[in-house]
Image (cartoon, coloured by chain):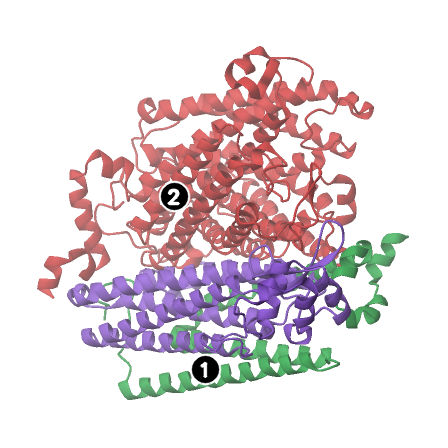
Chain colours: A purple, B red, C green
Amino acid sequence: MSTQTTVHQTKWWSGGKSPFNLEYGKLMMWYFLMSDAFTFGAFLISYGSIRFSQNFWPDPNVVFNAFPGAGHANLPLAFVSIMTFILIISSVTMVLAVHAGHKEDKKGVIKWLAWTIVGGLAFLGCQAWEWHHLITGEHAVLATAADGKQYIDIIGQTMGGNPWGQLADHNTAMVALNNSSHETLLHLVRESGIKDNGQLAGLSHEKLVGMVQLEHLHIREKGPIAFGGYFYGITGFHGFHVFSGVIINIIMLLMSQKGVFERRGHYLMIEKAGLYWHFVDLVWVFVFLCFYLI
Amino acid sequence: MSEAMNVYPEVTTSHAVHHDEHHVHHHKETFITKYIFSQDHKTIGKQFLITGIIWAIIGGLFSVLFRLQLGYPDQTFPILETFFGKWARGGQIQPEFYYALITIHGTVLVFFVLTAGLSGTFANILIPLQIGARDMASPFLNMLSYWFFFMASVVMFSSLFITTGPASGGWTVYPPLSALGQALEGSKLGMDLWLISMALFVVSSLLGGLNYISTILNMRTKGMSMTRMPLTIWAMFFTAVLGVLSFPVLLSGAILLLFDRNLGTSFYLSDIVVNGEILPNEGGSAILFQHLFWFLGHPEVYIILLPAMGMVSEILSVNSRKPIFGYMAMLGSLFAICILAFLVWAHHMFVTGLNPFLGSIFVLLTLLIAVPSAIKVFNWLTTLWRGNIRFTPATLFAIGFVSLFISGGLTGIFLGNSTIDIHLHDTMFVVAHFHIVMGVASMFGMFAGVYHWFPKMFGRYLNSTLGYIHFWVTMVGAYLIFWPMHYQGLAGMPRRYLDKSSWVSFTQFGELDKMITIVSIIVFAVQLMFVFNFFYSIFKGRKVTTTNPWGANTLEWTTPIRPGHGNWEGEIPEVHRWAYDYGKDGREFIPQTEPIGENESKH
Amino acid sequence: MQHPAFEEVTVHHHVQDDAAFRKKVRKTTILLSIITVIELGIGLTIYTIHKGANPNATLVLMFKGMVCILSLAKAFYIVSVFMHLGDEIRNMIMTIVVPLMLFIWFIIAFITDGNSYKNLRNKYDPHFKESTMPKKHQQKDKKETTPVEKSGKE
C-alpha cells in the first residue's frame, strides 16, 4: 500500500513493462480463450444439467457406432477416435509451425501450417459425414398415435427426435408391428436382410409382419429429445471454431507466403493463431468426453 | 532493420515512438477518423457516453409511460394514442405495450446505459489516462467494441418499430414465455432481435473487457505498480474480469434460446400447452435458462456497480482532501465482491423450484457479500470523516451514492434470505431494492464521474448551479419514488402487473402510486435538464484554465487541458507514489509524479 | 534487452534448443495418444458392462470418473506443453488457472439442480416417471425419496 513497500515487490509489477513478459496481443488471446472456455463450459454444463434431469440417457456407444464404408457393422467409438487423432496430430503440426516461427524459418512455417490446415479440413469432413449419417439414418422406433395405439416409425437423429431410447420389449414391439404402415413394414423387411426385387410390395400386411426379424432390429422407444439439440449444438459450435481456426490458419499461411512476418521480423501472429488452434483441440477433449465417453 | 522500419514503422519500433508518430500525423485527420471511426480512447469513451445518454432518455421515458399506467390506471391520455397508435388505444396503455415498456426499460438501462454507458465510458477515458498509457493496448479492437455496441443499439432500436413490437417477456426473457411466439406478440420477431442485439452486445463488451484487462496489466507507466493505481482503475479491472467471464455464459444461454425459438430444439421447453395446442417439445428445463441467465445476471449487477464504486472512492478522496481510508481493504473488498459475484447467482431463483438445499448454500454465499460491501461503506464514511470537504456536484453525487448503496444494500439482506424471499419475491420490494442499490446508485456514480471528469473530457466545466439542482431533486426524488415501494412490496403488491385495482387490499396504495408517478415525471424532467447542461457545456461551458482544476494527484491531470491522441505531449510521466497523498506533511496534495522527498513521512 | 516489436516485453524468449524441443513434443504426442487409447478402452468397457444382464452402476460410475481424470490430464498436457503455458511466468499461469476454479461451483450447482429437477418430476409427474424410467431400475428407485420432498408435504 505504501510507496515504500511497493519498492520491495518483484520488479515485474512495477510498471513500464508487462508483468508477464508477454505482448498485449498474446495476453488478450489468452483471456479471450478463457472467456470462450466459459461459453463452451456453459454449453457442456447445461448438457450435464439436462442429462441429470432425465431418468434415461442413451449410451453413446450405441449411437456412435458407424464407420464410413462399413455398412451396418457395429464399431462403437471407432470413427470418433479417428477424429480425435486427426485433431491431436493437427495440434502437433501447429506446435511445429509455431516453433518454426520462433526460428524465423519461413519454409517450416508454411509447411507445418499447411499440414495443420489439412488436419482441420479432414476433421470438418469427418464431422460432416457423422452429422449426415446421424440425420439421414433410419431407425425403427415405437411411436404412439393420437388414439393411443403404438406403431413403428422410422426416424433419424434430429433436433426434434431421438431414436435412441430404451429397447422395446418383444411383445410391445410385436403389437406395434401389426399397427404399422405398409411402407414401414417394407423398410423393416429390407432391413432384416431380405432382397427386394420388387416382389415385396405386393405382399400382404400379415406376410410382411411375418418376415420381419424383430430380434435383429433392436426396436427402441423414442429417447430424450434434448440429446440431439445438445449434440448438434455443441459439436456444431465446436465445428464452427474449427472452421474459423482453419480460416485463420489459411490467412496466416498466405501472410507468411507473402513474407509479411519476415518483414516484421517476428512470427508472433502465428503464436496467437496457434493458441486458438490448440484451444479448439482442448475443447474437443471435453466434447469427446461428454458426448462419446460418459 | 532499417528497411523493415520503413515498411512497417509502427510494428518494428517501440511503442513510445509509434505513438508519437501517430500523434504527429493525427493533426491531419479527417472528420471521420477523428470523430466517427476514431481509435482514440477518449473519443471512444465519449461515443459510449453519448450513446448511453440517448439510451437513458429512451429508457427513462419508458419508465415515465408505465408509471403513468401504474399511477393512473383508469385515466385516459389521448396524447398517447396520437404518438403510439394501437399500442395506446383510446389513450390507455395496452397490456402488450406495458410489457414491452418494462422489458425494454430494464434491458436498455441495465445493459446499454449502466454497462456500456458507464464502464464503456469511464474505462475508456480513465484507464489510459490514469495508468499513464498513450492509448488502449489495441485501439483498433477498442473502436470495434464501440461499433459492436452501436450495432447492438441499432438492432434493439429497430425492434421498437416492428408490427409485433419489441421483446416483452421482461428483461430477464425467461422461457417459455420468451421462446414461444404464439404465447406473446413480443416473443415473435422482437425477441429474435433482442437476442441478436444481445449477442452483438456480448461481443462488444468482450472486446472492451479484454482491452481493459491487458491495458491495465501491460501498459502501466514506469513506477505505476498495481498498488499505486487509483481505485477507479482497480474497479474497472474487476469489472472487466467479471464481464469477460460471465457474458459468454449469457451468450450460450441466448444461443440455446435462439435454437429453441427457431430450430425446434427442447433445451428450455417441456410439457407445454398453448391455446389448447400441445407442443412437441419435451425434456427441457426452464430453470436451466434462469441458471444460465443469472450466472451472467448476478455478476452483471457488479459490472454495473463496481465502476461507480471506484469513481466514488476517487472523487470522495479528492474532494475531502484526505487519503482514501483503507486502500488495501478497499482493494480486497473489490476482489472479494468480484469472486462472490460468481458464486451467488441462484439467489434470484429461490422460488423457481430450485433445490431448497442448494438454495440454502446460495443464501450463505449471498449474505457473505455484506462483509466486503460494509467494509467499503465504512471506508467511504471514514474518508469523509473530518475531511475538508468541497461540495462540488460530483462530491454530492458521490455521497448520494454511498447513501443509496447503504439503503439498497440493507434490503438486499432481506432478499438474500430464501425464506423471506418466499414472501417478498416478485413484489415491489424487489423493484425498490434493485433500483436503489443498482440502478439509482450506479446512476449517481455515473453522474459523479461525469461532473468530475467533464473538464478532462471537454476542457470545460458543467454548470454547477444546474448540477446542484440536478443532485437535490434526483436525490430526494429517488427516495420518494422507491422508498414507498418497500411498503407496497411488504404488503404483497406484485411487480410487473398492469393493473392492481381489482385487489381491494392494494387500493390503499392508489394515492401513493399517483405520488410516485408525479415524482418520477419531475425526476425525469430534471434529468433532461442535466442532458441540456451536458450538451450546452460542451460548447458553451466555462473554460478550464488550469491542467489540474480539482487539485488531484492522478495522472490524467498532468496531461494538457485538451489532450490529443497520445495524451502526453512529451515523455509519459513516471510515477513515484500512490494516488492518495492528500493533506500529507502539511501539503494539500502531492501528485503521483512527484518523487518521494527525503524527509517525507510514511502514510 | 528489449523485444524488437513490443516495448512491454523486456526479456527476449530464447529459441529453444531444437533437439530438446522435438523430444518434448514427441513425448507429449505419444502421451496424448496413449491416454486417448486408454479412454477409448474404458469407453468400450462401459459399453460391455451396459450390455451385460445386470449392469453394475458403481463400476460404471468409477470408470466414468477415470475417464474424466484422464481427460483433465490430456487438457493439462495440451495447455502446458502445446500452448506453452508451462513456460510462462508463474503469475501468468495463475491468472489463467485461478478463474477456471469457478467451474467447480458452476458444475456442482448446475448438476445438483438438474438432479433435483429429476427427483421433483419423478415425484409429481407420474407420466414422466412411467415413460422414461428404465424398466430394470424402476423397482429400486421407487424407494428413493429425498428428505427435501418429504418436508414439502408437511
Residue A86 in view, yes or no: yes
As drawn, is A41 to the left or to the right of A277? right
Q: Secondary structure at mark 1?
A: helix
For image coordinates 69% across by 15% down, the residue present is: B74
Residue under numbered circle 2: B148
Q: In the figure, A65 relative to C104: above or below?
A: below
The quarter of the displayed image where residue C1 is located: bottom left
For image coordinates 33% across by 64% down, the residue present is: A246
For image coordinates 39% across by 38% down, the residue present is: B150
For the N terminus of chain B, the quadrant is bottom left
Marking on residue B29: none
- Measured as percent of width and height from the top left, residue B427 is found at 72, 35
Residue under numbered circle 1: C32
Neighbor class of circle 1 (other Cα within 10 Å; few <14, some 14-19, many 20+) is many
Q: Are marks 2 and 1 in contact (CB under 8 Å)?
A: no
- Measured as percent of width and height from the top left, residue B264 is found at 57, 49
As drawn, is B36 to the left or to the right of B244? left
Residue most toward the right?
Answer: C154
| Closest to the observer, B281 or B546 | B281
Residue B320 in view, yes or no: no
Q: In the figure, C80 relative to C142: above or below?
A: below
Q: Give me the C-alpha separation between circle 2 and circle 1.
A: 40 Å
As drawn, is B600 to the left or to the right of B67? left
The quarter of the displayed image where residue B493 is located: top right
